[in-house]
Image: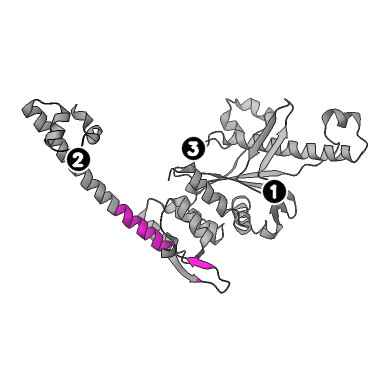
């Protein structure tokens, strides 16, 4: 599926839910352990802006941001990628710096407004002595069609000799690429269904078995999985039942069965049309040679619309 905007919208909607967000974090960072709990997450601004030392304002827009109030306080950021972004290491480095700069500046300005005593060093650095910053953790969920082939750390972007490594800090991506996994049990039902379906795309037999495992998914999950996978089908065709709480549940297997059947029919139709084009091309070629006439005249004699001329340009 190449409609980047639509695909990103489906991903963004999918992770609006705190349960799915927490599950994604636990699956990627904590091997499926129930460390981050949905009720510990709170909304955070997805637009992070700060004025850096050069005086210029810098802004980063994240896909999804949450504050986590558990054993630590952290800002969890999910970046949903449909395509490989070869700048991703640099993007996350910049985003982290801007996030920390915003925190630093906010605490300093609050102290100034309250009239707290500011030392000369604090004034010149515009940072309070001993200030502790909230960790910024960025997770990149890659959902593209091909395996991630970009850099995963700063070291990979540098022409770096081994003896220089101790003096250069590395920056590593927290990147999850479903292509690299065959077991998605670190995730709960909805995230697991999403990554398993993505891993089965292009393999009809594998897809049939995979989709059949998920007979009861809620509306948001069903829409997201079908949208990210590029499957277009009316949702009412997949309806299974309503739960006691009034939640509508859907089945994925019918969606992919219909999708594959549509693909087969489209392939047959394309084959027929291609056969017709080849037949017409041969007729045009013979007519042009026997009567020594240009392509346009041959098309008129065979009553082929002139707007289709581009299809036969090889005969010109």
Q: Residues within 10 Å of mark 3 (few under 14, many from 20)?
A: few
Residue that numbered label 1 is attached to? 44
Q: Which residues make up the magenta segment?
A: 242-264
Q: Is residue 226 above or below residue 127?
A: below
Name the side, left or right, on which 301 lies relative to 87: left
The answer to which image quadrant residue 313 occupies is: top left
The answer to which image quadrant residue 235 occupies is: bottom left
Task: Report the residue at 57% width, 32% height from top.
Answer: 156
| Residue 183 visible | no
The residue positioned farthest toward the bottom in the image shown: 244
Q: Nearer the viewer, mark 3 or mark 2?
A: 2
Residue that numbered label 3 is attached to? 149
Label 3, label 2: how far apart the Cα atoms are: 39 Å
Which element type, helix, strand or loop, lies under badge 3? loop
Q: Nearer the viewer, mark 1 or mark 3?
A: 1
Q: Is residue 209 above or below residue 76?
A: below
- Coordinates of residue 5 in the picture (x, y in percent): 50, 43
Which element type, helix, strand or loop, lies under badge 1? loop
Instruction: Name the residue nearer the viewer: 279 or 305.
Output: 305
Task: Report the residue at 71% width, 39% height from top.
Answer: 99
Residue that numbered label 2 is attached to? 277
Instruction: Name the residue nearer the viewer: 204 or 101.
Output: 101
Q: Earlier in the sequence, mark 3 or mark 2?
A: 3
Task: Report the residue at 50% width, 38% height from top.
Answer: 84
């Amino acid at each position: 599926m190449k409609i980047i905007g639509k695909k990103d919208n489906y991903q963004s909607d999918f992770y609006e839910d705190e349960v799915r967000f927490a599950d994604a974090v636990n699956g990627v960072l904590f091997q499926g352990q129930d460390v981050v709990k949905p009720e510990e997450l709170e909304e955070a601004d997805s637009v992070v802006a700060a004025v850096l030392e050069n005086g210029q304002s810098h802004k980063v827009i994240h896909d999804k941001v949450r504050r986590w109030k558990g054993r630590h306080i952290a800002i969890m950021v999910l970046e949903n990628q449909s395509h490989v972004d070869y700048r991703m290491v640099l993007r996350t480095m910049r985003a982290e710096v801007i996030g920390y700069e915003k925190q630093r500046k906010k605490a300093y300005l609050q102290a100034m407004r309250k009239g707290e005593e500011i030392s000369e060093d604090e004034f010149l650095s515009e940072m309070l002595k001993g200030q502790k910053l909230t960790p910024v953790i960025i997770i990149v969920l890659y959902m593209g069609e091909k395996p991630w082939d970009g850099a995963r750390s700063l070291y990979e972007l540098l022409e770096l000799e081994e003896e220089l490594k101790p003096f250069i800090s590395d920056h590593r991506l927290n990147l999850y690429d479903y292509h690299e996994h065959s077991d998605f049990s670190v995730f709960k039902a909805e995230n697991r269904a999403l990554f398993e379906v993505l891993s089965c795309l292009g393999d009809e037999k594998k897809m049939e078995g995979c989709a059949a495992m998920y007979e009861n998914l809620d509306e948001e999950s069903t829409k997201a999985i079908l949208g990210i996978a590029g499957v277009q089908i009316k949702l009412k065709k997949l309806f299974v039942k309503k739960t006691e709480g009034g939640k509508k549940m859907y089945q994925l297997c019918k969606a992919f069965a219909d999708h594959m059947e549509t693909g087969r029919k489209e392939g047959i139709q394309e084959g027929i049309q291609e056969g017709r084009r080849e037949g017409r091309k041969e007729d045009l070629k013979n007519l042009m040679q026997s009567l020594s006439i240009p392509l346009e005249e041959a098309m008129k004699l065979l009553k082929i619309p002139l707007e289709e001329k581009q299809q036969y340009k090889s005969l010109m």
